[in-house]
Amino acid sequence: MLLASSCDDFLDINKNPNAATSADVNLVLPQAIVASAGASNSFNSYGGHFGGYIANAGGFSGFGTLLTYNLTASDYNGLWTTTYQDPLRDLKYVIDNSEGNDQLSYFNAAAKIMSVWNYMKLVDTFGDIPYTQALRGEEGILTPEYDPAADVYQALIATCDEANDIINNTVTPLRLTKGSDPLFGPLAESTTERDAIAQMADWKRFANSLKLKMLVRIAASAGTFTFDDVDNSGGVSDGDFITDDAIVDPGYEKNRPNPEWNTWGRTTADALSNASRIPTTFSFAFYSGTKLSDAGRGRTIFVNYPSTPTNQLGNEVNNPVAVASQVQWAGSGAYAGLGVLKGPAQGQPILLLAEVKFLLAEAQLTGKLTLGGYATSFNEGITASFNYLYKDQTEAVTAAVAPLVTAYMTANNTANIGARSYLVNIADATTDAQRLEAIITQKYIANNMIASDESYNEFRRTGYPVTSPGGAPAVDIASNKSTITDRTDRLPTRVMYPSSEAAYNAANYRNIDYRSATAERIFWDPN
């Protein structure tokens, strides 16, 4: 009998000691945060093409639907499947295994806030998505229904408040250590633990900043904005939102590189990751003097600035080739190691301070947020953009930014830029339409190849920066091979639901019209 029992245990092939069925939330949370940083890179790449930052370089072919916008359900599958499978599944695990546990409440709150970030990315890309029934396969829900995008936004806004309340009301929490918090913990190379109160205050500011973004996008129906009083100062203050760039840094280095560097910079073998893409003439014109003059940022972003090769997406007639052996979105010479692609050890930004300042400026301009003045937030957004670009891989700012900002303001008050000076000096704007154009245009400049998808979102929502369809490459944001003729901007309104949904969730899958005059838009897009 003993022999039979032993054989039964030995031959039980249903238990795999190498496939864990449970894990410590302290180990799962950082994995999910780092996976979110990887998703950020993927969304940035998608937005770079649709948002007018990335063009095809000479010497390559086979771009297919990217140039024509003849989208299929197979395009951008990974944005959907990877986001659900990696960060969101792990974040749900952390939430489920920490819910109601006071000791683990900080983990619970952080996971909920990161879930908001990921779900918002999905809504802004695909519209209606599985949310209420998402990731519930263990409950037998294998074909989750799609929630209306506007309802998901409202649920996410409520989740931000819920997470902040959890942090405020926790009594005996375990802290998020350096290893479990690669977002607001200390840098990986530091041995100093941050004060838990300061660390969780950053999480609350991050939650409020995400909430601000959603409320700005639904401003027509959102009423006057309200926020939890994070710093207990009474009322809403600048301290209720992030005060520095939100950057994920688990300790990237050459053999474990930052995801954006790995995509657009160099491989671990030091070869160029991508030579088939170069900057667009449209985006470069905001730095080169064609539309605005911005040498201070241009020389940190573009290789060999101002002699950077550029192209309009779709142009394959004598189109420039990428600079040989050089990373295309990186500073050169004295500016190497700065800008967008700083190096393999740089952290991965998932929310720029500049973007939040411009969101504040818009909310203040429209009277939705009774806090400060739009001009102050606008100018702080420009300064924050310079600050980020002049950070090196260690996140240290390497130059005095104030003189660079002053030079930028001065350059754009000269005669040749005078008609557009309000895009930099918002006091020169004479209408609210010009002021909004200035805010969104500066957000476009700040997000260049960092959060390009956010610029594509804002272009669809506001129509800025201004484009002239069929015009010169410097003023036409769309591919010159666009087959979308029913829409003025000649851009798709959104991407299609992925083919994986057609295969595994056919009951809820639907084909999307993304190209006609009555094409389906994301719910916050009036254009």
Image (cartoon, grey):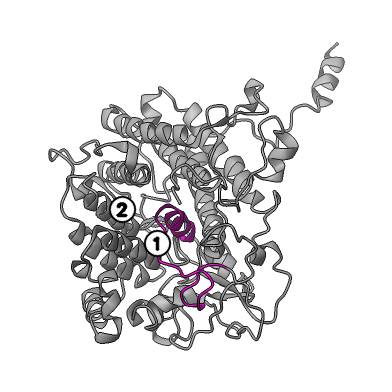
The disc at residue 164 is none
Query: SS class of the residue under badge 2?
Result: helix
Q: Position of residue 71 (x, y in %)?
A: 67, 55
Q: Closest to the observer: 125 or 322? A: 125
Residue 277: x percent and y percent?
A: 60, 74
The answer to whether residue 209 of the structure is visible from this angle is: yes
Q: Which residue is mark 2?
A: 359
Decide: is 382 above or below 106.
Answer: below
Tag count = 2
Between 255 and 290, the residue placed more toward the observer is: 290
Asked whether, in this view, residue 119 is left or right of residue 385, the answer is right
Q: Which amino acid, mark 1? A: Tyr
Point out residue 515 in the picture as x, y percentages from the top left corner. 60, 53
Kind of residue at badge 2: Leu
**Span shown in magenta:** 451-478
Q: Residues within 10 Å of mark 2 (few under 14, many from 20)?
A: many
Say which residue appears at 27% left-offset and 43% top-offset: 201
Query: Is residue 364 found left or right of 458 in the rendered image?
Result: left
Is residue 350 rendered magenta in the image?
no
**Quarter of the view holding residue 300:** bottom left
Q: Is residue 498 above or below residue 420?
A: above
Side (left or right) of 255 relative to 59: left
Quadrant in which the N terminus appears: top right
Contact (CB < 8 A) between labels 1 and 2? Answer: no
Residue at position x 50%, y 78% from top?
Answer: 472
Where residue 199 sits, quadrant-wise, is top left
- In percent of width and height, residue 421 lies at 26, 75
Seen at 52% across and 46% down, the residue is 521
From the image, tell me which residue sits under label 1. 464
